[in-house]
Image: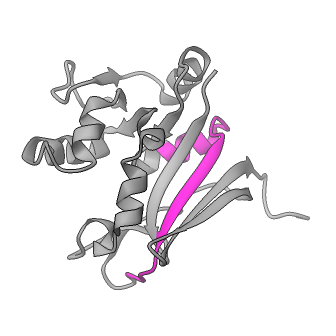
Amino acid sequence: MSDLMVDFIISLDGYAAAEGWPGFWGMEGPEYLGWIGSESELEHVTLMGATTYRLMSGFAAEAPEEAGLAELTAMPKVVFSSTLKAPLSWANSELVTGDAVEAVRELKQRETRPLRTVGSLSLSRSLLEAGVVDRFRVVVFPVITGKTGQERIFDGYPDIELDLISSRTFDGRLQLLEYAPTILDGPPGA
């Protein structure tokens, strides 16, 4: 059986991206880049929705040898979409057009490698709501993108209690936080 980790990179104020800012908000350092390219971080099946697939496959087509993209191209990817058509053009990508939660439950039963999301805010939210997520991990970048921030990550999420499993600092400024999530019916004591 496989574990599922929802994996996000975020600004301190909870945005996935910001207009005019480069990827990683221009703050990726050698320690962080080395970690995301390490073998332990590459041994999983990547899950994503159609929007993330279109974005990432486009980046990979434009810069196939760029660090991180070449590795992602080589990894197995499962893409959940009702709008994309098979066969997908990005290497090692499998399209699932049915119910994502049921497909992930089946994947968790048969897959030996860990499962991880990349981006895919709606997919991640539905997997968390369904209770199939084992770990929730964020890397917090020390920026506030209040005026230019796009895609607030946690809007529309259920109430979730997070138990800290591990933490780490990269390049003296990026904070990795890994949690075990528990979906709550509402605020504690309500």
Residue 50's spot in the image, x, y percent? 30, 39
Instruction: Locate the N terminus and report the quarter of the image it occupies.
Output: top right
Tell me what residue is drawn at x 34 percent, y 31 percent.
Answer: 79
Coloration mode:
one colour
Q: Nearer the viewer, residue 156 or 33?
A: 33
Residue 164's spot in the image, x, y percent? 72, 59
Q: Looking at this view, name the residue that lies furthest to the right.
A: 189
Q: Specify whether residue 141 is painted magenta.
A: yes
Q: Which of 121 and 164 is in front in this view?
A: 164
Q: Quadrant of residue 26?
A: bottom left
Give the total of numbered labels.
0
130, above or below 94, in the image: below
Chain part drawn in magenta: 124-145
Left or right: 109 in relation to 69 = right
Left or right: 105 in relation to 71 = right
Residue 62's spot in the image, x, y percent? 8, 47
Q: Nearer the viewer, residue 164 or 106?
A: 164
Q: Specify whether residue 37 is painted magenta.
A: no
Tell me what residue is drawn at x 56 percent, y 42 percent.
Answer: 5
Residue 76's spot in the image, x, y percent? 35, 26
Tell me what residue is drawn at x 19 percent, y 18 percent.
Answer: 87
112, above or below 101, in the image: above
